[in-house]
Amino acid sequence: MPEKMLQVALIGQPNVGKSSLFSRLTGVGVISSNYSGTTVEFEESVIKRNGVNVRVHDLPGTYSISGNSADEDVAIRMLSDPDNDAVVLVADATNLESSLVLCFEVMELGLPVILALNKFDASKKRFDTDVDALSNYLGIPVIPVSAKTSEGVDNLADAICAGKATVSAFQVKYSNYIERSITVLIKLLGETRFSKRGKAVKLLEGTQDFIDGVPDDVQEKAEIIRNSLKELLGESPNIEIGRDRYAHSDILIKTVQKKTQRPQTRAEKISDLTIAPITGVPILAAIFAIMFLSIIYLGEYLSGAVEWTYDVCIGDFIDNLAGSLGGNLELILIGINGSIRAILSLLIAYILVFYLILGVLEDSGYLPRAVVLLDSLMHKFGLHGGAFIPMMVGIGCNVPAILATRSIHSRRERLIVISMIVMAVPCSAQMAIIMGVTGKYAGVEYALAILVMLLVLIGITGLVLNKFLKSEPSNLAMELPDLVMPQAKNVLYKTWERIKDFFIIAFPMLVVGSVVVEILLAYNALNIIVDPLSFITVGMLGLPAVVIIAFLVGILRKEMSVALLVILAAPLTLDQFMTPEQFVVFGVVMAVFMPCLATFTVMGREIGWKDTAIIAFVSMAVAILIGSLFNMIFIAF
C-alpha cells in the first residue's frame, strides 16, 4: 500500500520565525535572519511522520494576500494550488495583532488552517495566552511552538500529518456597506477554488490575482461597486476592510491574552532606547562607527595575517619556481602569485569582518529597530523605513539586496531603492576596495571621506527620484523581535553561507582572469583597449592608462578590480604604481561604478532591461564625474 502524501503551505508575516520553523519541521537549512524580508522565493521539503509523507512549501513572508507586491503574488499562487491539504499560518505570539489579521484573510478564503503560535516561549514571559479560547473562537487548531527551542514542533507535525487542519466558519463582521456589497457579489460568482465570501471580499479589495479569474461581467460589476463604495466611504474599500479586520483582531487579543504583571526587562529597556530618536540616533551612529573602525583595523590585522600565512605556505615557493623558469613565464607566474596574494589578503579579510558584524546585527534583532528609527528620514525620499533593510543587505552583496526589494509594495519605491543601492551602497567587495586599498594606501580619513560622499549621493539620488516619481510613500509595517544575545553558531553559519560563494565561484574566476590578463600583458595585447580610453583614465581621472582594465574587469566581479590592479602594477608594488591621491580617485570610481554583471542580470529580471540599462549608464557617468571632480580638487590643492 503506497504511503499517503499531503501538501502543506507554510505562510506568515516577515519576521515571525516562519523559515526557522520550516527548518525545525523539515531539517532543511534555511538562513534565518532577525529582520523582515528574508524569504523572497519559496523553499520546499518533504517530511515523513507516522507513515505519512508531507510536502511542505515555505511561502514568502507577506503582510497580507492582497496582491500588492511580488511576495503576495507568489503567496496567492501557492495558496491557489488545489493540491494543498492544509495551510499552516505562523504567528508571532509576542505580537499577535497583525498575524491574526493575516489569519482572518486566509480563513476567509475557505482554506483548511492550523495556527502555529511561534515564539511562545518568549511570549510566556510577557503574556498569559488562553490557547484553547483562541482555538474555540477561530474554529481551528491553535498550537503553541518555539522554533528556537523546538517546543511544540512535534505537536504541530502530528497535527499536520493527522489532517487536523480545519475550514473555519469564523467570519469578520464588516461594516453594513461592505457586507451588502459582499452579498451582491456572492450571488454573481460561480464555482471557485476559494469560498465565495472570501473571493467577494478580494474583489472589493481590488486584488488583481482574484479579479483575473472571474467573468468580464462580474469584473465590471465589482468595479462599479468598488467605485461606489469609494465615493460613499471617502476612501478605498480595502482600507475600510483592513480597519475592520484590525478592530476584530484587537478585540480578540484583549479576550484571549493578558499582560503578565512584571517589571520591564533590561532587554526591553534597551529596546526602547534604540527606537527613541534622542537616544536611538547616537546608538545607531556608534554602531556604524564601530563597524567602520572594525572593518578598517581588524580587517587590516587579518589582511596581514593572511598575507604572512600565504607567503609562508605558498607564495615563496611560487616566486622561487618563477625565478627558475625565466622569461615571460617568470613574469606571468610572479603576476599570478601577486594577484592571488592580493585577493586573499585584501578582500577575504575585509569581507569576512563585515559579514561577521552583519550576522551579529541580524541575530541580535537590532536591524528592525534601525528601520523604525529611520522611517521619518526615509519618507523624505518617498520611502518608508523598511527600505533600509535592502540597503543594509546591499553592503554585503547587491544581488540579494535587489531581490529583497520584492518586499516593497510599489514599483516606484523599488526603482528608487534599487537606484540608491546601485549608485551609492557599496557591496562587500567595494567596501574591501574602499577600506583595504584606499584606506591602506591613502589613509583612513580618505576612506571615511568616500563613505561620507556615498551618504550624500544616497540622499541626492533619493531626493531627485522622489521629485520625478511622485507618489505618497506606503506606511511602515514592522514587527520588532526581542533583543537577544547573538548566537555564535548562527552568526558563523550565516557568515560561511555568504562567503563560501567567493571561494566556489569568485576565486576560481579571479585566478583564471589573472592568468589571462598576465598573458595579454606579457605580449602587449591590451593596448587596443587602453589607448582609446586613456582620455578617461589619464585625461579626466588622472590615473595610469592601464587602470581602465581594472574598471572594465570589475564589471564582471568587483573583487577582480583589485587583483587586476596588482597585476597591472607589476613589477612595481601598488604604493609605487599610484599616489595616495590616485588611490582615492580609484576608490571613488569603484564605489559608484556600474553594477557587477550578476547585479545587472538580476536587475534586468526584476525591473526590466530598459530601466536597468538607464541606471547602469547613469551610475557609470556619475562615477567618472565624481572621480574627475576629486582629481581636479587634488590638482588644485
Image (cartoon, rainbow, N blue to C red):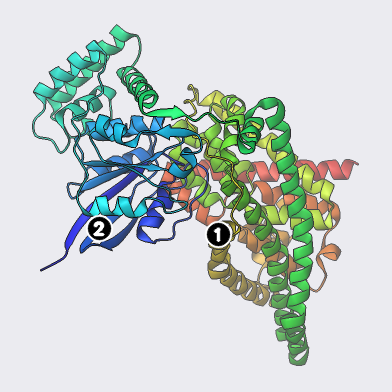
Q: Quadrant of residue 52?
A: bottom left
On the picture, is 450 further left or further right than 410?
right
Left or right position of 600 against 244: right
Task: Indicate the secondary structure of the residue bearing disc 1.
Answer: helix
Which of the two discs, 2 and 1, labels the residue nearer the N terminus?
2
Residue 579 falls in which quadrant of the image?
Answer: bottom right
Q: Position of residue 459 (x, y in %)?
A: 65, 32
Q: How many marks?
A: 2
Closest to the camera, between mark 2 and mark 1, is 2
Q: In this rendering, would 548 be left or right of 188?
A: right
Amino acid under label 2?
Answer: Val
Q: Residue at x 17, y 26 (%)?
A: 197
Which image quadrant: the N terminus?
bottom left
Q: Is residue 492 shown left or right of residue 22?
A: right
In front of the other: 350 or 198: 198
Q: Which mark is residue 192?
A: none
- Please state which amino acid type lies under the numbered disc 1: Arg
The percent coordinates of residue 373 (x first, y second) are 62, 30
Q: For the C terminus, which image quadrant?
A: top right
- Residue at x 39%, y 23% (from the top left corner): 254
Q: Which residue is mark 1?
A: 498
Q: Which of the numbered marks, if any, corresponds to residue 54?
A: 2
Q: Quadrant of the rendered structure where residue 6 is?
A: bottom left
Q: Residues within 10 Å of mark 1 (few under 14, many from 20)?
A: some
Can residue 302 be seen in this snapshot? yes
Q: Is residue 57 visible?
A: no
Q: From what the image shows, is residue 233 above or below residue 48? A: above
Outermost residue on the top side: it is: 232
Q: Is residue 2 above or below residue 296?
A: below
